[in-house]
Image: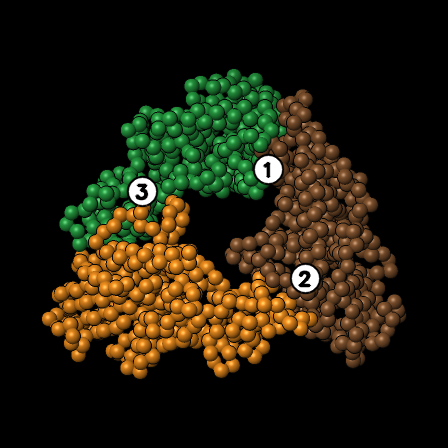
Chain colours: A green, B orange, C brown
Amino acid sequence: MFLRNLWYVAGRSDEVGRHLFQRWILNQPVLLYRTEDGTAVAMQGHCPHRSLPLSKGRLVGDEVECGYHGLRFAPSGECTHVPTLEKVPATCHVKTYPVVEMNRWIWIWMGDPALADEATIPDSHWNDDPEWSVTEGHLEIGCNYALLVDNLLDLSHTAFVHTDSIGDRSVAETPVDTEVSGNNVTVIRRLKDVPPPPYFVTLHGWNGNIDRSQHIQWTPPTFIHIVSWTAPVGTDEGDNSNALVYRVLNGITPATERRVHHFWSIPRNFARGAEVDVQQQEENTRILTQDIAILEAQQEMVDRLGGSPDSLEAWVNIPVDAGAIRARRIVATLREQELQAQS
Amino acid sequence: MFLRNLWYVAGRSDEVGRHLFQRWILNQPVLLYRTEDGTAVAMQGHCPHRSLPLSKGRLVGDEVECGYHGLRFAPSGECTHVPTLEKVPATCHVKTYPVVEMNRWIWIWMGDPALADEATIPDSHWNDDPEWSVTEGHLEIGCNYALLVDNLLDLSHTAFVHTDSIGDRSVAETPVDTEVSGNNVTVIRRLKDVPPPPYFVTLHGWNGNIDRSQHIQWTPPTFIHIVSWTAPVGTDEGDNSNALVYRVLNGITPATERRVHHFWSIPRNFARGAEVDVQQQEENTRILTQDIAILEAQQEMVDRLGGSPDSLEAWVNIPVDAGAIRARRIVATLREQELQAQS
Amino acid sequence: MFLRNLWYVAGRSDEVGRHLFQRWILNQPVLLYRTEDGTAVAMQGHCPHRSLPLSKGRLVGDEVECGYHGLRFAPSGECTHVPTLEKVPATCHVKTYPVVEMNRWIWIWMGDPALADEATIPDSHWNDDPEWSVTEGHLEIGCNYALLVDNLLDLSHTAFVHTDSIGDRSVAETPVDTEVSGNNVTVIRRLKDVPPPPYFVTLHGWNGNIDRSQHIQWTPPTFIHIVSWTAPVGTDEGDNSNALVYRVLNGITPATERRVHHFWSIPRNFARGAEVDVQQQEENTRILTQDIAILEAQQEMVDRLGGSPDSLEAWVNIPVDAGAIRARRIVATLREQELQAQS
């Protein structure tokens, strides 16, 4: 039961091209490719004839030819050819999905196409902004998407999971403020006069304590934008002249109930250049891999004990959960609205 | 829900001998071996005492001794010995299945033994005919048997799946005739003045276009006999003097709902001899392996999207499906008859 | 549906220490560790907050800190710290289980703690007795625990499964006596003037036939104590002066419905010393590994044919099953009593 009438990241721009590529999104197989003019296409991943994955066929110009019996489908989803038939029956077509390519990501709309409004795509322009250097990646994690949303909406976990890099005990012991505005949830944490975590020392060479803040904004269903700000003790939060500021943009796309895509990018406007890019890429991937071990162990425990990671009923809540709980409530309301709109 | 009152190929003659060999057939474990006089025996694969596979026991003369507690079973299924017991209880016996060995294959009857009539075993005498050279094999494929029947009843797929060997686009674009006679279905395709596919050029050295025909006959539940005829343009179909003719005999045996055995043999009466045998064995295995990739991808898609490959409800049909659809209808009728006979 | 109000072996003394170790017992994840004074602790294996396995956290003194959000739990199960909270909510605690360490094994009580009575722990003092040399081990087997209990309560299987070591056909052909005393079941087999099995010849150098006896005692739910006695023909059973006597103690602990722990020890009071220990360790492990192949094949067959290894309905019984059947009946009665006590 995923929300459908919202935008999800379907892929990175650089992984979709003149080849047939299948990805599972919201329990559906989706075929991704580009037409000859470079436009990205997202199409139902299986042939309506006998269900062969269309990714096993081939591109003929802008059309997809099924690799089993040669049916051809245009980017519109129309079937343009069935061997031996002069006129293709109207029932023979594939579903296509609205896609928008923006800032290195391809966004997909899995719900009612009439409701797809580009203006509601979350802002990720930093991915493309020449003022920012970007490291980015795609991970596939063996857990329900809700566990990954929880993880990113509560950074107290960095103190325990990422102790050797970006975490410090002071983060966990500092309470957060949680704000809800419309369907957005924001979690804010401000730390004054605390030790810098190991990786920040590496990056900036801090000497002694620092001030920090974390702004985390969730946009339904699954986009999370984190702004991390670090500066010498006493610096005004608006003053970036000697601050370490970076953003973490997260596009979270459920593949199945137990599998999720994590599209991440980390634009920064300090220490730019290829050498730091390489170092950041390695370090960020290492950090996110530490999360995978946690998330998959959680999912396995939930599966074995019998429960749903999408529900909170079996769990005790603590203060840091405030943001995640509010986000889940908004998802539940939106789901109810989608169900009512269908009936 | 497999048809039971019909013959299936249980194994190749050369894989059954004086050893205990288990194979799953129609969701049942079946033990296969030969008595000292060479007669093939098919017996329930698990001990009625504590379900150990009897294949883990040993042969004592013509009897099978269970490898856990030493119960012995005769080829008739009778239990002849239980340790410490003078008289074996009547409830202790194993089911046995009628088998007939014919033309290098061992046929099994999984249904009511009273109905087993050898005369209804499909003809495969070419496997044994000195006038024919044979290549043959056994493949186990991770799909429902119905998907393999569909595959062999519609050779238009050769144009897309076997492009590099036996397929040519002209096959797909030539309509078929489908005939039903009793419970048999025949699909016929005739191609006039078409290019020869790559492997036929290799085999016969064709220069320029050819005429071709394909006769495919299905006998329920799962026997498929293909006759492929190729000759210079304008040759009479009855004239084999300069033709390339071969047969493809297919014994298809469901192991489980998602696993099938494919016993195949390809007798030919041209280019006989050991050297061509080796070449044919390699090439035929390569071609059939291309089908496995398709069939297992189909099954995975059906499993994930939730459906049954044994039903056609979710699928769009096209003209080449005519034979497969008729075969499925006959299976449905026979299944209904089996169910009524049971009640 | 496992019996809960009885003692099970949770682990070997030497595998539990100052580290966090998770084991599944009766379908529950259990965390095992020792406090600084060496006391063994058994605690619910997952954090009540978000279900991360606590084994992924760390020991802080005698407390366990969750590796995701830093909640801390005392050996009593009390939550002593939640980051940012002055007062931990009463709902936040973990279940703990009574444990008793005795004779190299750690016993656990998974049921109502009020009923846990150390006096009912089966006697395994030979594990610690300086008069006895011990080989021991832990195996995890992919089957329901009931199949392993059946195996150990009926040693006729040694004639077929362990032919090359401790088995001889004479064992299978000698009837057993089965006695029930309270909730204990004893199976006794006496063999007079029979050939010694191969491993006994190796151990003792027997020349010609011997007398043997096997006493097997089952204590619910899953403790099995075997006494094997072998001596020259005509020796009084009480006379151990020239006898080969050893015990096999078996603590059987269900992990899940399809997985079981086998804690075994084999104390002997003959041929003591390190050299024989090594030889025994190898040989005993080899013999028990032969059983694993049988037990897992049984379980797979039961799973595929659809049934329950915990029920006997689908099976034919023979005389050697008498002990196992009585043990299953006692388990059924105890289960009924546990269910009634709950309601």
- Of residue C294 and residue B223, the one placed in the foreground of this image is B223
Amino acid at the residue labelled 3: Gln
User: Judging from the image, what secondary structure is the residue with disc 3 in?
Assistant: strand
Q: Which quadrant of the structure image shows residue A333?
A: top left
Residue under label 2, please give it: C321
Chain containing the residue with disc 1: C
User: Judging from the image, what secondary structure is the residue with disc 1 in?
Assistant: loop
Of marks 2 and 3, the one in the foreground: 2
- Mark 2 crowdedness (10 Å alpha carbons): few <14, some 14-19, many ≥20: some
* Disc 2 from disc 1: Cα separation: 43 Å
Residue under label 3, please give it: A44
Residue under label 1, please give it: C52
* Disc 3 from disc 1: Cα separation: 36 Å
* Disc 2 from disc 3: Cα separation: 58 Å
Answer whether labels 2 and 1 touch (C-beta < 8 Å). Answer: no
Amino acid at the residue labelled 1: Leu
